[in-house]
Amino acid sequence: MKVTIADLKQAITKTAPTDPATALKLGWRLVDAVPHDIEGRLWIADLLVQLGAPQAAGPVYEAIAQYGIRGGHPLVSLVAAKVLEDSDRDVSDFYRTIARFYGAGSSKVSAHGQRTSPEHPDTLVQAPDLETEISLPSLIAGAARAAANLDGIEDYPETLLKIPLLSELPEPSFVKVCETIRCIRLPAGSMVIREGEMGRSFFWLARGSVSVYKTDMRGRQTELAQLGEGALFGEMALIQAAPRSASVQTRSDADLLEVDSAALSTMAEHLDAVALALDRFARERLLNNLLATSALFVPFSRKQRMDLLRRFTGHEVAPGTIIINEGDEGRGLYVVLSGEVEITKEQEGEQVPLATLKAGDIFGEIALLKGFPATATVTATRRSTILFLDRTYFKRLVNALPEIRAMFENMTEERLRDTQMVLADDMIIEASDDLVLI
């Protein structure tokens, strides 16, 4: 009788909580059938612990740690190492090995590296024999032996995928981060991050999948993304000391590796290297998101987007910094890469708030299109990164591409309507020359 790998895995997850011995039989069959499936080995190790056989599980976790490095699953390796560390095993050599394989300067990692992958879920394998009686000690010994044996694995990848952020670190800093990482193992449906809470840590997803979503004022949820093995998330709120902008919930059983602000504070001599790598990673992610989602870049090919992006200069601004003063001459176009800015207009000696702009939002275009001074003030409310395009390049852009000009003109009209609604009770805007937003 044959079963699919997907059905076999589903049976393991279903039976593990209530019947770990049967789940162990299923896991043993999976490892025999698909030796390069690292998740099957991890299931066996966890089931051995659940059955009260941690000594038998130890060599399996060690095999997972070794295999994960060579097979392109380093985060799963770190999970196994953390389990061993919790049982007072010395894993310092392992941390040094993974740092040599995946750290900065390693010849083994590449942006186009690979990892060993399990067989297609619909692949048929021999069904496990659940009828034949086997004593629990024999089952434990046999499954442990099978899961700790790496002889059946062939064709390791020649080059390996980088680990987000970690692969930017030199070996000593890489090892220090490994030492401070905390492993969190969660069942399906667990909340990892809640929208609105302050960000105090970031995560790698070692195994499983998570859903990223936002919730509106009516309680409706909109899924933004589904993340799988290798993903890094949660870093932006930590970098910006800002509330979480979305929630993250596990879609399946998941293993996560967390670095929190307290852990970062313990690595003083390595903090600069980690902070630099984290900032570089976050900036690259923000730029990629901006290129993919901003209406400014949508009409262009990837190469054209990069060429346009090179025309911008980046500027870090502290909270309270005035980026544009009401009455200033229009100097260029601004894009919020990260952080937050507030738009205000003076009215009877007071600053009236008109709008809050966040990552991806554009400002400064109205003064450039209309040729009059800025009619509002723009102030950073949080530490922000602002991209700036000089007005010379902006004019070339809108003159060469009618669709870009149309986009900015439509944006102008929409912002004018929003401003009129905000100020309707206090003042009347009679002409387009008195546009409120810049």
Image (cartoon, rainbow, N blue to C red):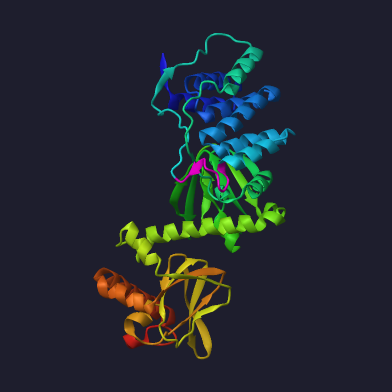
Q: Is residue 48 above or below residue 236?
A: above
In this image, 321 relative to 305: left or right?
Answer: right
Quarter of the image that includes the C terminus: bottom left
Query: Residue 243: horizontal and vertical position, in percent?
Result: 57, 61
In the image, farthest residue toward the top: 132
Residue at image location 42% in from the left, 27% down from the top: 119
Query: Residue 310: horizontal and vertical position, in percent?
Result: 40, 66
Camera-nearest residue between 438 and 103 = 103
In the image, farthest residue toward the bottom: 348
Query: Residue 409: horizontal and vertical position, in percent?
Result: 30, 75
Residue 332 seen by the camera: yes
Residue 19 seen by the camera: no
Asked whether 341 falls inside the magenta stretch, the response is no
Residue at image location 54% in from the left, 22% down from the top: 27
Query: Residue 414: horizontal and vertical position, in percent?
Result: 34, 74
Camera-nearest residue between 189 and 56 = 56
